[in-house]
Image (spheres, rainbow, N blue to C red):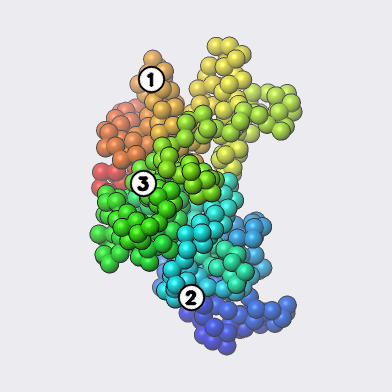
Amino acid sequence: MWSEGQVLDERYELRRRLGRGAMGEVWRAYDRRSRRAVAVKGIHRELLDPHHPGELIRRFTLEANLLAGWKHPGIPAFLDARVDSVASDAYLVMEHVLGRDLTQVIAEGPPLSEDEVVSLAVQICDVLEHTHAIPVIHRDLKPANIMLTDRNRVVVLDFGVAKVFRTDQTRLTQNNRVLGTVAYMSPEQCEGREVHPRSDLYSLACVLYELLTGITPFPDVDVARAMHHHRYKMPEPVSLLRPGVSPALEAVIMAGLAKRASDRPASASEFRRRLESPHEALATSPPASSHLLPPLSDPAGPTLESLSTAVRITRAQALFQQGFIAQAMLAYARLAQDLADLGPEHSEDVVRCRFGLARCQRHLGYLEEALKTLTALADELRSRSPDDRLLLEVRFHVGQLFLDLGDEHGIAELAEVYRTLTDAARQEDEALTEEVGQALTRATLG
């Protein structure tokens, strides 16, 4: 790809290759202009697809935009980028972090103490809280992507395969390569289903398992078997491989390794709370649904309440479209409550707000709560025509949620929606028909 001594744009002199990530190589370089060491990342040439030349540069641009917008001590500072050219010439320039990645920490030993593991985990959770709030899902959390500096500061690297929850449908593969690392991949990611914040928590639990035991949850197996194990098999208990480990710490890690996303801690902050409160960590039941919604208050409440219903709904939609899912969930919840109080003449808007709320719940990983919201909504809408557009959209999401939760009833639900759409053959439903058809095909073939 690059070679030692090569100079990029007459500025960045490449000194030593530091490692390889999911998308490219990372080099230690000397910035001739600022006269300091930096880290430069470029794209693997073997990943360049001549049939889709823009896909990889789009991902690279996404990573640049993410890093440029973040200010967090646990994420390397963004310095420069060249992404306005062909993919083979693109690069990112970031802060050069001095230290060891956790792969080196594990290999070089000695084994970390429980307190050290918890300290690392709490810092990683802090980074994930920051990125999930957007929400951005890392999708490749592993020891090689977590640096430990000489001051014990944790830095999370390589957001090259991150997923941003907007309306785009970023694929999990590129040139038939799985994006992510199988040893730390969540069951839903192995199945090609939607990822969400709890997917990163599964990967984090895999990392903590390895820090304590010295091995991954499913070691010494090929890719296909590893993916099968992630989906269906629980790993050996941590205490079997590291006798004497705290039962509370073991309980947090094993909860993070739950096959069903809804059985894992609800968020990075919940994961951290369990780590920091060992007397509570043995309680592995998911939080009550009332804890899943932010408080129904808004610092700009009086201003928002003075806006028309149409404007408030559009604002909630815009928040969702731009990826501010937690804020959109708050807006939809507040709207649904306010409009319901105004009377039945606002029932259609209430329905749409509840639909928006459920979509936010699904994006944030609250799958069972989203399914409960949508099934109740579908039952209410069945009094309408069977080919009512909103009813079909709701049923489409119900089918996908069934599949997200491992329930094969989702295939039957998608099939019924697809049959109704194709029978109706309305031009305005073409996009929805295509989307349902693709989801049904993925479910039946995968």
Contact (CB < 8 A) between labels 1 and 3? no
Q: Secondary structure at mark 2?
A: strand
Which amino acid type corresponds to the residue marked 1 in the rendered image? Answer: Asp
Residue in view at x 38 percent, y 66 percent: 214
In the rendered image, the residue lying farthest to the bottom is: 5
Residue 272, how many percent across, how many down? 53, 49
Residue 212, how many percent across, how many down? 41, 62
Within-10-Å neighbours for mark 1: few <14, some 14–19, many 20+:
few
Contact (CB < 8 A) between labels 1 and 2? no
Q: Gap between marks 1 and 2, in whole Å?
A: 53 Å
Residue beneath label 2, please? 19
Q: Is residue 186 visible?
A: yes
Look at discs 1 and 3 and give the one toward the viewer: 3
Considering depth in this image, is 270 or 380 the residue closer to the camera?
270
Residue beneath label 1, please? 379
Of the image marks 1 and 3, the number of the one nearer the N terminus: 3
Of the image marks 3 and 2, the number of the one nearer the N terminus: 2
Of the image marks 1 and 2, the number of the one nearer the N terminus: 2
The quarter of the picture where residue 109 lies is bottom left
Residue in view at x 31 percent, y 40 percent: 406
Q: Gap between marks 3 and 2, in whole Å?
A: 31 Å
Position of 131 relative to 435 (above/below): below
Residue in view at x 35 percent, y 43 percent: 260
Within-10-Å neighbours for mark 3: few <14, some 14–19, many 20+:
many
Which amino acid type corresponds to the residue marked 2 in the rendered image? Answer: Gly
Q: Is residue 72 left or right of residue 206?
A: right
Residue beneath label 3, please? 258
Q: Secondary structure at mark 1?
A: helix
Residue 56, how many percent across, how many down? 48, 63
